Image (tube, rainbow, N blue to C red):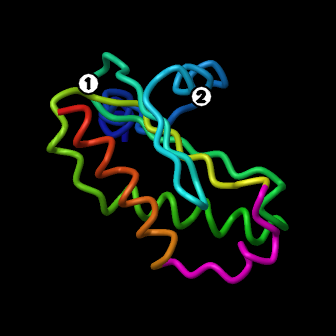
Amino acid sequence: MPQQLAQNKEIPKRHLRKRADYLKTYKGFSVRRPMLALYARSNGLASHRFGFTVPKVTGTAVIRNQFKRWSREFYRNTDLSALNESLDLHVYVGNKRMKKEVYKSVQFKEFQAQLNQALQFVIKNFK
């Protein structure tokens, strides 16, 4: 048991934790899509970190949590080995110009396509 706890402490954190880390990503590179914005910035660490923000503009808690689950799933299945440096990636889901009803009808494939386009653009510019 103690060995497992020691091993877990050595694993680097894989998500953004502090508000300051989220705010730093806004000063980096950004890609906007109709449904989301992806912010990226070098972090100088050994691994990539990922975070997301889904404001109330997108809808109820059920809808917001759905986008959070989709974002986590996308990050788990994404290969970031093409990047030479480690990044902080921040996905901001939402657009004040879009109505809440639009977010209710979004399918995972549509969200995944927009997030993938944004991520490919980031990978292309950070090589």
Q: Which mark is residue 22?
A: 2
Q: Which residues are magenta?
A: 97-108
Report helix, strand or loop for mark 2: helix
Residue at (82% x, 66% y) in the render:
59
Residue 14: percent from left, percent from top: 41, 38
Q: Position of residue 53 (x, y in %)?
A: 66, 46
Give the amino acid at mark 1. Ala
Nearer-N-terminus badge (1/2)? 2
13 drawn magenta: no
Image quarter of residue 10:
top left
Q: Is residue 62 above or below residue 122?
A: below
Q: Residues within 10 Å of mark 1 (few under 14, many from 20)?
A: few
Q: Amino acid at mark 2?
A: Tyr
**Residue 31, relative to residue 107: is it above or below?**
above
Q: Residue at x 25, y 42 (%)?
A: 123
- Asked if residue 37 is positioned above or below residue 115 in the image, the reply reads above
Q: Secondary structure at mark 1?
A: loop
Q: Nearer the viewer, residue 6 or 121?
A: 121
Identify the disc placed on residue 46: 1
**Residue 124 or 78: which is nearer the viewer?**
124
Rounded to the nearest angstrom, the CA distance separating label 1 from label 2 is 18 Å
Q: Quadrant of residue 6?
A: top left
Q: Quadrant of the C terminus?
A: top left
